[in-house]
Amino acid sequence: MAGRRRRSFLFGFLRGLLFAEFVLLATWGPGPYSYLGWLGRTPFGAAQAVAGIALLIAHVALLRMAFLALDWLGITATLTLLFCVLLAAAHLGLIDLAVVQGRRGFWLFVASVLIAAGLIWSSLQQRLSGEGTVLKTPP
């Protein structure tokens, strides 16, 4: 049971990461198949309006869930941890920060990791504290 629970947190994080990455790349992706690329290629129409509204709803939902779970302190701590991991990877020669910092896809990945951490945090907090539910008052 414990192994299954740990795996579900990992799969929950990966699921949140993939969904956040999909929403962010579908909107802001550097390729021609993003929403912004679609707006630039064709005149604005009803299909683009519907897709834009759906993407806006997805962005608001993801950001609100992540913010309610992490709050300002958790967002700062998550960004600090992510920054330390990136510095360690650069120190080990795994990535070159000078090259990747100018790429939009890199920053979209960083944002999706932050959102995925927010999506899984309440489940992890519930598991660590033993509480039945973890409710916070929305702002």
Image: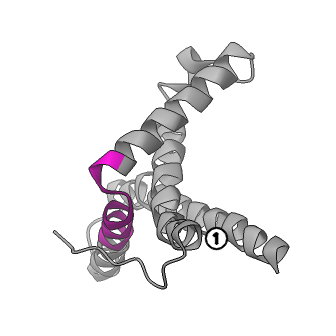
**Residue at image point 47% right, 39% down:** 107
Depicted 48 relative to depicted 25: above or below: below
Q: Residue 108's x, y, as percent? A: 48, 46
**Residue at image point 82% right, 81% down:** 1
Asked whether, in this view, residue 43 is left or right of residue 114, the answer is left
Identify residue type, mark 1: Gly
Q: Residue 101's x, y, as percent? A: 49, 25
Magenta-colored span: 59-73
Depicted 89 relative to depicted 58: above or below: above
Q: Quadrant of residue 36?
A: bottom left
Residue 64 part of the magenta-drawn span: yes
Can you name the residue that lies furthest to the bottom here?
A: 132
Q: Residue 92's x, y, as percent? A: 74, 17
Q: Which residue is mark 1?
A: 12
- Marker count (numbered): 1
Q: Residues within 10 Å of mark 1 (few under 14, many from 20)?
A: some
Asked whether, in this view, residue 121 is left or right of residue 69, the answer is right
**The one of 87 and 39 positioned closer to us in this rendering:** 87
